Image (cartoon, coloured by chain):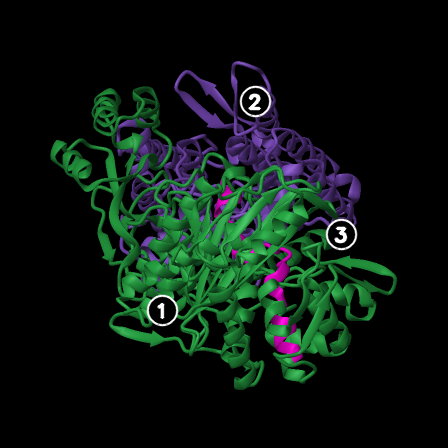
Amino acid sequence: MPQTEYSIYSLQKRLLAILGIVAFLFLCLFGKLFWVQIIQGKTLQTKAISQWTRDLPLAGLRGSILDRNGNTLASSYTSYDVYVRGSNITNPSEVALFLSELLGLDYDTIEEKASKKNVSESLIARQVSESAVKAIINKDLDGIYITETSTRQYPYSNLLSSVLGFCTIDNIGQTGLEAYYNKYLTGINGYTMTESDITGLELSNATTSFVAGVAGCSIELTIDVEIQKIVENVLAKIMVEQQSKGASVIIMNPKTGEIVAMASKPSFDLNNPPRDNTELLMSLSKNSLITDVYEPGSTFKLFTLAAALSEGITSVDEKFYDPGFRIVDGDRIKCWKTTGHGSQTLVEGVCNSCNSVFVDLGLRLGVDKLYSALTSYGIGSATGVDFSGESSGIMMNKASVKNVDLARISFGQAVAVTPLQMITSVCGILNGTLYEPRFIKSITTNGVKKEFTSVSKGQTVDQSVSKQILEIMEQVVSKSDGLYSFVPGYRIGGKTGTAQKYENGAVASGKYVSSFVGCWPVEDPEYVMLLCVDEPSAGQYYGSLVAAPYAKEIFAGIFSYLEIEPTNLKEDLEKLEPTVEVPNLVGYPLMQAIEQLVKLDLQYVIDGENGTVLEQSIPAGQKVFKKAIISLKT
Amino acid sequence: MKTKFSIFDNSNHSINWWVLVPAILLAVFGVIMVYSASCYNAEKNFGNAFYYADKQLIGLILGILALTFCYFVDYKFLAKLKYWALGLGILLLLIVFIPGIGIESYGAKRWIGFGSFSFQASEVAKFCLILFCAGYMAEHQQSVQKFKGILPVLLAGGVMCVLIMLEPNMSITLCVGAVCLIMLLVGGARIKHLVMLSIPVMALIPVLIFLEPYRIKRLMAFLDPWASPQGEGFQLIQSLFSLGSGGWFGVGLFQSRAKYSYLPFSESDFIFSIIGEELGLVGAILVLLVFGVLIFSGYKIAIKANTRFGCLLAVGITSVLAVQVVLNVAVVTGLVPPTGLPLPLISAGSTSLVVFLGAIGILLNISRQSAVNKFHTAENPFGKKWKLTKKVSTQK
């Protein structure tokens, strides 16, 4: 039986081989078990626990935002989110009835959520007040859960809205400084961890652990809320009186770059942003003073002036003649006053805001020198402000600037800046050193305070040049422009600007940005203000008429808030003594009317192209002060 | 002492404790673990924490009865039933497809149900196939060395595999295939033939995998379960969470957290994860060692069996046990792609428990008869008793 023997012999051997394979496989299993349970055990367990427990957040309150004097601009308080968990509810209709009455919500929606058995928590209401929560706790119904959250509140509601910005419903900074400083303001949420099954149902013997939340840092701004209030009140007035599309103000300390006030209208209530209207929300929540550019017009002349004085290519006494235009490379560039300013000194040229004077200065400087001066003043680059979405303005490519362009840039055309850039650069030339503008003053957490210091971006002009510019600006305010920005007893400097708006690359007729930059005190400015009125439509558009008077109001408000005593009040008031009686000009030929006004030391602006005066802004017989401006309609 | 052949053989009650004790230990332990793993879901879904445990306990009692019965029945009698067994196995697997009797669950037709009673056809069918293979190869021990001789076994195994595959149930198919292979090997088939056979079968596996998109997904989930933690990878991740939380000594009996609806099939296919979580690596390895003792004893019985049929039957029974244990633990630890296969004697499922305990009874019977009739000597371990076996069967 050789075959049988073979089979018997092989059977035992083969069985042993199979046993060996099984033993080997068992060893593999032991190895894998050791790997999973011991080597990877801790990692897996950590992940497992986070899955096996349900954690509910405990709000870490978002930090407050304060003004420079400690007034609260934004703060958070604890509120509560209310949830239901259907699997723990025996009587959904009772729960739904109670909650819908307490919170003023729809009964059916709550009942539906309370009846769902297979899901974890369903949210019923967010940011519910403490009193409502107390009522829920007292009622003691099963299946209603409350988690801590927080609600952001802005005590000044509309004030500073485009700067502060707002948060999402989840308290994440969405716009403005709330977004920019979100990581500092955000609190760290704590949580409660409860053992639960996969549907979130709490285990009968569950243990619950608590980790408390940590509040966010509070930040202090350079904003002075009192000045901000003054500014916003005046802006509201502008919106009504000038029927403008918008109005805005920035006030900055030129010595530090601190932004003391920044406001733009229209504004909105930060406590109740129009979240449902995305388009409106987007347009309101944008801070156009930082993100949008405009053509500055005559206020830009200050930079040309600074460059010319620095380069020594002119002096304050130099005489210029303006026939009402300049011809540059065959192009006729008009002065705003088409009849011309005649012969005038540089100072008078600035007071008259004569374009021809600045065309001369610009051409004398040349592209290289003007551009390098503008660059050192900060034009053409972002200011570096602590705010998102800053625009760096628009400057023509230096290589493609022709003389005509140079001439226009010199008086503030063919160039676009953001309002913030404008004021920052003005601060730069008035102070001699350019500083990065900023909103942040300090960040505080747990009693530890980090103060922010000014960041210098370099020298702009010599102190002597700054002084000369300031003196000229004072003259603009105190001797020209109809004294519209003149505050008796205080030494203010200023410069107006009126720029035409462009739409789709062409001049938009009748649309202007009227602006005013001012500073105080002229001896050593602490406050520099830029006021812009966007598309005034109440009849006037010259910066001296539309912007300057409001700048004056703001300055006056600041002086009264800061309790600054006037000096030389008597002398100043005399300037405003109504000593001149306005003659009747209606029906006269324009040239005759002008002659009369010049004789009386009154100033004028002309609106229209005809030769005969049709209307006069101040009626005949009314007494006005010298240098007052009368607008003539022809 | 020598009685005439009868169905009940009362000659001697020498019990192989190395098989009985581990088997009963595992089955009792199984009832406890089924309770632990299922109590939460049972309470939640049926309002009775003991819903699965009660069924398992009934299975245990019936299983012990089956074991006792099989222990007393002369296993040699089973050889006569080999064609009936094959017929029954194939019939059961066909019944599954009859609407009304076959029960579809999770997209597969695997159960046969009468009223509240239901069982998985393949659980019974695989033992039917073992019985047939053992009986056939014992009878035709010479011819199995020729390829023609193993064809009936291959055909029987092939038909069953195809039917199980149609349910579909890939894991049991693999299990049945593997057991078939082991039996052919032990039965004396030439290795050359088996290798030749294996090549087309191996080639078929990837085809079968790519035929069903869910298998590809499972395969991908196995390779990187974290890619789809909520989808295909979910079950494996839950299993690993459970095992990983066990550490060396476990979180304590009944203290599992994964059983709170996190780990699907925690009382059946994935019960080993719960064992690992509650009793730790030490407990898990201990359970495997008890299985090891059982498997080793099973193969020892095969070697010592006094008939070729007994030997092959013992090999088949032990192999089913071994293959299922290895495959199940490999699945729950993420060593092979997830596939639904119960852990013998422990996983919830009373049919499986009854059938396995019955099979253990057969093993004990084989062991007892070889112990009673000590035909083996050191020089001639299998003696001339093959002839005797033949005689006995031909006499009948």
Give the amino acid type for the residue marked by disc 3 in the picture.
Answer: Val
The residue type indicated by label 2 comes to: Val
Tag shown at residue A571: 1
The residue pinned by badge 2 equals B96
Q: Horizontally, is A444 left or right of A400 in the view?
A: left
Residue A563: give x, y in percent of width and height. 26, 66
Mark 3 or mark 2, which has the lower sequence index?
2
Name the spot of residue A129 as percent of width and height, x first: 22, 40
Placement of A15 over or under B372, stated as above or below: below
Q: Could one spot residue B270 in this view of the protein?
A: no
Along the viewing direction, whichever of A37 and A149 lies nearer the viewer? A149
Chain for disc number 1: A
Label 3 and label 2: CA atoms lie apart by 33 Å
Q: Residue A135: where, in percent of width, then height?
A: 15, 34
- Mark carried by residue B195: 3
Q: Is residue B377 left or right of residue A112?
A: right
* Tags 3 and 2 on a common chain: yes
Helix, strand or loop at mark 3 = helix
The hue in which chain B appears in the rendered picture of the protein: purple
Density class for disc 1 (Cα within 10 Å; few <14, some 14-19, many ≥20) is few
Colour of chain A as rendered: green
Looking at the image, residue A549 lies above or below residue A612:
below
Q: Which chain hosts label 3? A: B
Q: Quadrant of the N terminus of chain B?
A: top left
Please provide the residue range marked out in magenta.
Answer: A281-308
Q: Judge whether A560 appears above or below B187 on screen.
A: below
Furthest residue in direction right, as rendered? A330
Alpha carbon of mark 1 to alpha carbon of mark 3: how far? 119 Å
Q: Main secondary structure of the magenta part?
A: helix
